[in-house]
Amino acid sequence: MLIKHFVAIGLLSFTNIAHAHFAWLERGQDGSTQAYFGEWADDVRETQQGPLKILASASVTQAGKTLPATTQDNHFAYASQGDADVRLQQTFVRNDTRILFSAKAGRSETQGVAELELVPSAAGSDRFTLHFAGKPLAETEVVVFGPPKWSKTLHTDANGQIQVPLPWAGQYVIEVSHAVDGAGKVGEQAYAKTRYVSTTTFTVSK
């Protein structure tokens, strides 16, 4: 009971910032991948003592293979290999809302997998189509973060497409969210609506 009590306190603390934070992945120079939770642009990376624990049960895959996690203080590490995109999925219920975090490191794959995902028109392209439930999602806000802690808000066009500006070398994170109504359950937890939060991370070399 004591363990459950502390977990509940942690989740309550997390839900207060769930709408501000997001999950993202970063590829290391050795090909490994790290999963973070917080605010990329503000250098906020939550720790195991705080909201990062919400990603402890996340599913992380590469080329359809599940990657086991190694726990670090402010991230989870995964032994990914090669150039194939790495993907994270996590689901939980906050009050009456089901929240689905998805994160992708890379832009080599031109077929979407997650329910909400930015899909490049070609491998390595700066033009993307935002897919939701397998269809283009038009007129939707997309936020691009990049070096040097720069950000720009865009909107997909009538075909769900955007051209992403990449003015500097370095890492970029693109965030998008989408909410829909619809009741259901995750285990014993009921929800009335769902909020999808998706990020795509990649590095540009100039």
Image: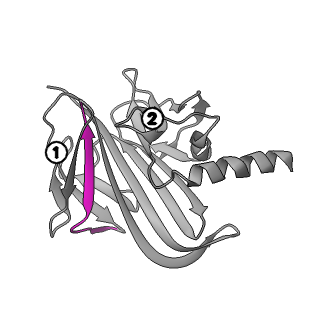
Q: Quadrant of the C terminus?
A: top left
Residue ID at (34%, 66%): 132
Q: Is residue 196 left or right of residue 55?
A: left
Residue 113 on image: x %, y %: 38, 56
Q: Secondary structure at mark 1?
A: loop
Residue ID at (25%, 46%): 144
Is residue 110 among the parts visible in the rendering? no
Q: Which residues are magenta?
A: 134-147
Residue ID at (36%, 59%): 177
List the residue tagged with mark 1.
Answer: 126
Residue ID at (21%, 68%): 139
List the residue tagged with mark 2.
Answer: 44
Q: Say if 119 sits above or below 169 in the image.
A: below
Residue 135 on image: x %, y %: 28, 69
Three-letter code for the amino acid on which mark 2 is drawn: Val
First in residue order: circle 2 vs circle 1: 2
Task: Report the mark closest to the observer, 2 or 1.
Answer: 2
Residue 5 on image: x %, y %: 79, 50
Q: Secondary structure at mark 2?
A: strand
Q: Which mark is residue 171?
A: none
Q: Is residue 137 magenta?
A: yes
In this view, the residue farthest toward the right is 1
Q: Is residue 140 left or right of residue 196?
A: left
Please tell me in which quadrant of the rendered image residue 106 appears.
top left
**Most foreground residue, 81 or 190:** 190
**Most foreground residue, 68 or 152:** 152
Three-letter code for the amino acid on which mark 1 is drawn: Asp
Residue 128 on image: x %, y %: 20, 53
Q: Is residue 22 left or right of residue 6?
A: left
Q: Is residue 13 magenta?
A: no
Q: Is disc 2 surrounded by few (<14), some (14 to 19) or many (20+) residues within 10 Å? A: few
